[in-house]
Image: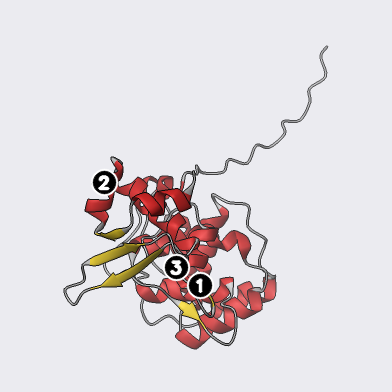
Amino acid sequence: MDWKEMAMEREGLYTLESFSRAEGIKKDTAVLYLHELRKRGLVRTTREKRGKRFYDVTPISLREVGSKGFYEILNENSPLKIQEPFVHRVYGKEMTIEEVILKALKTRSSRIILASIGVFRKVRDWNLLYELAKNEGMERHAGALYSLSRKFFRVKRMDSRILGRMKEALVKDKFIIPKLKSDDFKDIEKEWGVHIPFNKSDIEKLGVSLKVEIKEMPSQNRV
């Protein structure tokens, strides 16, 4: 796909709906296209007071200062893509994967938190994740999503000492997302004392299926 050429052909101001009509594609595909254009500095997102988003497509690359922001890092590391409501950049330092997970949890957004499950694959500093979660009183929330992620992705095992600290933490709010409980992950809810807001059908949106551990059967000698 020649994104520069697309930007030249589609130069102008669009809503998601008008862009998808112009390209003759579905809205989900339009989100992916706009994301790719955004990565190349060929679209700028703005939002009006009522919350309506507009996309200014231009073939002239927009110079951006600062480091990658929350939505860009989330979309780069999760199979589920999020429509960026605004341009978010970080100044002075780069945003870490661990910070992205905690920021996702704090949004209380179903789609954003679901997308963050795939990001656990990239966590390398579990102590940092613990400290960030501790500052927000969300140790058990982060731990529960870690356990959920391990059911579907290859996730590096958390240090047992940090895991223990997370499980010992007090929990003020058992809901990761208000009023949402799982019918399928009761084992994780029991382990962590918080409610998982997703079922297996939700996780399928990440394009993955439940990992099944196959145990080798003992061989039997034929008589």
Q: How far, Cα to Cα, is label 1 from label 2?
A: 33 Å
Question: Label 1 sits on what residue type?
Answer: Val
* Mark 3 crowd level (few <14, some 14–19, many ≥20, 10 Å Cα): many
Residue extending farthest left: 50
Q: Quadrant of residue 159?
A: bottom right
Residue at figure coordinates x 54%, y 82% from the top left: 132
Residue at image mark 2: 22
Residue tagged by mark 3? 71
Q: Residue 205: where, in percent of width, then height?
A: 40, 47
Camera-side residue of 201 and 218: 201
Q: 147 or 84, which lies in front?
A: 84
Give the mark, 1 or 3, whose residue is nearer the N terminus: 3
Kindly identify which numbered label has been placed on residue 46.
none
> Do the residues bearing badges 1 and 2 touch, measured as CB atoms within 8 Å?
no
Question: Which residue does the numbered mark 1 point to in the structure image?
Answer: 100
Mark 3 or mark 2: whose residue is earlier in sequence:
2
Left or right, 51 with reference to 71: left
**Location of residue 208 with respect to 92 vertically, above or below:** above
- Between the residue at mark 3 and the residue at mark 2, the CA separation in whole angstroms equals 25 Å
- Relative image position of residue 10 (x, y in whole percent): 33, 52
Residue at x 43% of width, y 54% of height: 185
**Placement of 157 over or under 24, stated as above or below:** below
Whether residue 184 appears in this view of the structure is: no
**Residue 84 seen anywhere in this rendered image of the structure:** yes
Tell which tag, 1 or 2, sits nearer the viewer: 2
Query: Could you tell me the amino acid type at mark 2?
Result: Ala
Q: Are marks 1 and 3 in contact (CB under 8 Å)?
A: no
Place of residue 178 in the rendered image (x, y in percent of width and height, measured from the top left):
28, 70
- The mark lying in front, picked from 3 and 2, is 2
Q: Earlier in the sequence, mark 1 or mark 2?
A: 2
Judge the density around disc 1: few (<14), some (14-19), many (≥20) Cα neighbours within 10 Å: many
> Helix or strand or loop: what does disc 1 sit on?
helix
